[in-house]
């Protein structure tokens, strides 16, 4: 056991669940072996508490560090903000400057509000939509955070979020009065959406969805949702917390030519610094004035400063093209390694948000073995890769070479029926289950 594993054992006695984010629990990767904590992170590399260096080929800050860990330009902007004072009785001018930049990138939008994380900004979006329409119900697909409005889907039926978040997730602590306010449908299932609108249209405040996740929309899918929402007086909200700034500079909805009423951003817009933004049309955004949506730390200076530096570098260096190239290379590499090893794998995701899974019995054990063997070779690795601007040719070459060897190792363990016997600890836990394709 290294220092990280020892610290995690202590953390589980002090912090419910051991970590603040489910996606960072060591059990999601490699129980009892995952380094758990970092001492330093720079570029594409991470050092654990024992000083061991790894190349980050997995979530990369759970999608936040789109330019790389501790990017020099973004850090310089944050340090400048600190030197000039991060909080004051007055407002920081950067929030106006950032609003102008976001609206320049999204000409359909007219106003901007801020928070500091994805869950907050999505709760804000739904609050504003309800205020604008005077309605309560929300039709949705996909994962949209931990707040009551979303998790209330499981009050009436604990299977409602199956395929959206965690199957059977208990909505403990969510008010029972929210029962029946959430109406789930699956991505690209236009029939289910039509049924919801036919049954509940006059009481629906918003349609909430990611415009793209594992793949793009079927022909006409987004267009029909847009047209139907508009005709029914329903606010269309695109959750771009994860998809934003991956395939282009701004929201991925720009690539599909479908304009929502509201769009939410976080994660990649500020490269690891806490920042989130909601943009939208004036008519809907002004409804925020009729509700109370306010927080002291939504006015601090570091987040907007980091976002300005991140977005400008993203645009000036065509970071989106690099992310797509990295993802395409890795997806092709996974397929090639699987073919050479005689393994069945499923590869998917937009290139910048790539993922794969082993199509074998004991698939979780196979992925655990993959992580265990890749860790021994100096890589933080699992079933997904969030591409970063810091991923360079040398990282990709070394990673894919290691994948070739490890896939061969896994294939041999499958043939010999010793997958679990090859593990030095328990099998990984299940992670987020996004909307079923």
Image: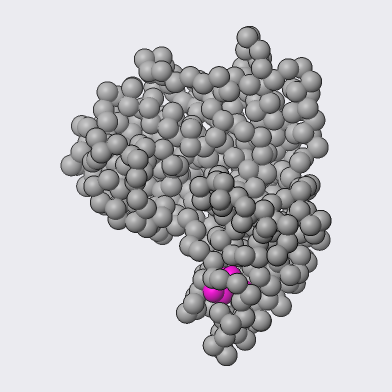
Instruction: Locate the N terminus and report the quarter of the image it occupies.
Output: bottom right
- Which residue is most to the top? 90
Q: Quadrant of residue 365?
A: bottom right
Where does the image place residue 30, in percent across and percent down from the top left?
61, 65
Vertically, is 218 above or below 202?
below
Q: Is residue 380 left or right of residue 363?
A: right
- Kindly identify the residue that appears in the image at 56 percent across and 79 percent down: 420
Quarter of the picture holding the C terminus: bottom left
In-front residue for pair 85/316: 85
Q: Along the horizontal axis of the image, is 294 left or right of 343? A: left
Based on the picture, tell me whether residue 366 belongs to the magenta stretch: yes
Which of 112 and 402 lies nearest the eye of the viewer? Answer: 402
Q: Residue at x 46, y 26 (%)?
A: 280
What's drawn in magenta, residue-wise? 365-369
Residue 29 is at least partly visible in this image: yes
> Can you say whether 192 is above or below 106 in the image?
below
Q: Is residue 408 magenta?
A: no
Q: Position of residue 297 (x, y in %)?
A: 58, 23
Is residue 135 left or right of 125 when viewed as pictured? Answer: left
């Amino acid at each position: 056991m290294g220092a990280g594993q020892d610290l995690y054992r202590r953390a589980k006695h002090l912090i419910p669940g051991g970590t603040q984010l489910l996606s960072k629990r060591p059990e999601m990767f490699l129980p009892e072996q995952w380094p758990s904590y970092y001492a330093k992170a720079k570029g594409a590399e991470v050092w654990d508490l024992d000083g061991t260096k790894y190349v980050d080929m997995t979530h990369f800050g759970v999608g936040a560090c789109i330019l790389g860990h501790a990017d020099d330009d973004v850090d310089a902007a944050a340090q400048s903000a600190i030197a000039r004072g991060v909080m004051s009785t007055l407002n920081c001018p950067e929030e106006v400057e950032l609003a102008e930049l976001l609206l320049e990138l999204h000409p359909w939008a007219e106003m901007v509000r801020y928070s500091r994380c994805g869950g907050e900004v999505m709760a804000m979006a739904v609050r504003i939509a309800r205020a604008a329409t005077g309605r309560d119900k929300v039709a949705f697909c996909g994962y949209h955070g931990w707040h009551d409005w979303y998790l209330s889907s499981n009050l009436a039926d604990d299977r409602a979020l199956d395929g959206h978040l965690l199957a059977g997730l208990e909505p403990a602590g969510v008010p029972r009065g929210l029962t029946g306010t959430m109406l789930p449908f699956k991505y690209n299932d236009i029939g289910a959406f039509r049924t919801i609108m036919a049954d509940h249209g006059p009481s629906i405040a918003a349609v909430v969805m990611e415009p793209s996740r594992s793949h793009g929309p079927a022909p006409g899918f987004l267009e029909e949702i847009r047209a139907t929402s508009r005709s029914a007086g329903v606010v269309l909200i695109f959750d771009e917390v994860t998809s934003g700034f991956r395939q282009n500079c701004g929201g991925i909805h720009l690539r599909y030519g479908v304009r929502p009423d509201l769009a939410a951003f976080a994660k990649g817009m500020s490269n690891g610094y806490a920042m989130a933004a909601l943009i939208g049309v004036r008519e809907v955004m002004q409804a925020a004035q009729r509700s109370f949506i306010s927080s002291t730390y939504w006015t601090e200076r570091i987040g907007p400063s980091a976002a300005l530096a991140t977005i400008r570098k993203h645009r000036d260096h065509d970071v989106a093209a690099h992310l797509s190239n990295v993802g395409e290379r890795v997806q092709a590499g996974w397929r090639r390694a699987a073919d050479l090893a005689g393994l069945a794998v499923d590869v998917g995701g937009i290139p910048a948000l790539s993922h794969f899974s082993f199509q074998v019995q004991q698939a979780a054990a196979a992925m655990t073995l993959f992580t265990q063997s890749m860790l021994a070779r100096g890589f933080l690795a699992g079933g997904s890769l969030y591409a970063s601007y810091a991923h360079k040719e040398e990282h990709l070459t070394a990673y894919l070479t290691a994948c070739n060897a490890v896939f061969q190792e896994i294939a041999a363990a499958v043939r010999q029926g010793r997958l679990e016997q090859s593990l030095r600890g328990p099998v990984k836990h299940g992670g987020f289950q996004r909307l079923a394709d």
